[in-house]
């Protein structure tokens, strides 16, 4: 039996629904292809590019909280994220992300993951 995407640490229902639009409907599928390939499919499906969402997935697959990122690791993940955006842009599928009105950057990112209630 396949586990839902939301069983991956740091992933909520909104992110799970977005991954479904990219054809990824189970945690096993995402684990099998890895964070970078899964996030590339996310981008190619027209989902918004957001660095916090990317690194929350990477850390979640490692069983770590999304707040557990700093220093050189953050720099390295940013370079990988930028590379994924560039790869997706070759097919013209990178959606832009903008902070919803009335939300802080943190609230908007948490909302993207389905962690905070929508206003």
Image (cartoon, grey):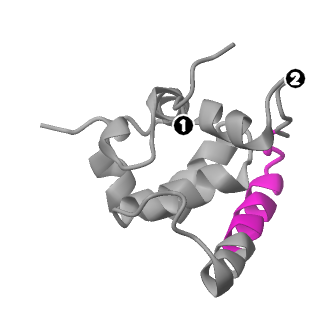
Horizontal side, residue 107 vs residue 103: left or right: left
**Residue at 69% across, 35% down:** 107
**Residue 87, percent across and down?**
75, 62
Viewer-nearest of labels 2 and 1?
2
Which residue does the numbered mark 1 point to in the structure image? Answer: 22
**Where 35 sits versus 92, above or below?**
below
Q: Which quarter of the rendered picture does the N terminus lie within? A: top left
Q: Which quarter of the rendered picture does the C terminus lie within? A: top right
Pointer 2: residues within 10 angstroms few (<14), some, or many (20+)? few
The residues colored magenta run: 80-95
Number of numbered callouts drawn = 2
Res. 33 image quadrant: bottom left
Of callouts 2 and 1, the N-terminal one = 1
Which residue does the numbered mark 2 point to in the structure image? Answer: 101
**Residue at 74% across, 70% down:** 83
Q: Residue 89 got which mark?
A: none
Res. 2 image quadrant: top left
Q: Which residue lies furthest to the left in this view?
A: 1
* Closer to the camera in the image, 10 or 1: 10
**Residue 105, percent across and down?**
78, 42
Q: Residue furthest top?
A: 119
* Closer to the camera in the image, 32 or 3: 3
């Amino acid at each position: 039996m396949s586990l839902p995407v939301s069983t991956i640490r740091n992933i909520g229902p909104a992110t799970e629904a977005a991954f479904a639009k990219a054809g990824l409907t189970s945690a096993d599928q995402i684990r099998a292809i890895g964070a970078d390939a899964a996030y590339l499919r996310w981008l190619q499906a027209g989902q918004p590019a957001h660095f916090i969402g990317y690194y929350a997935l990477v850390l979640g697959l490692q069983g770590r909280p999304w707040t557990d990122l700093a220093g050189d690791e953050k720099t390295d993940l940013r370079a990988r994220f930028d590379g994924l955006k560039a790869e997706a842009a070759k097919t013209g599928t990178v959606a832009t992300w903008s902070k919803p009105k009335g939300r802080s950057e943190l609230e908007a990112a948490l909302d993207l993951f389905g962690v905070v209630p929508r206003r």
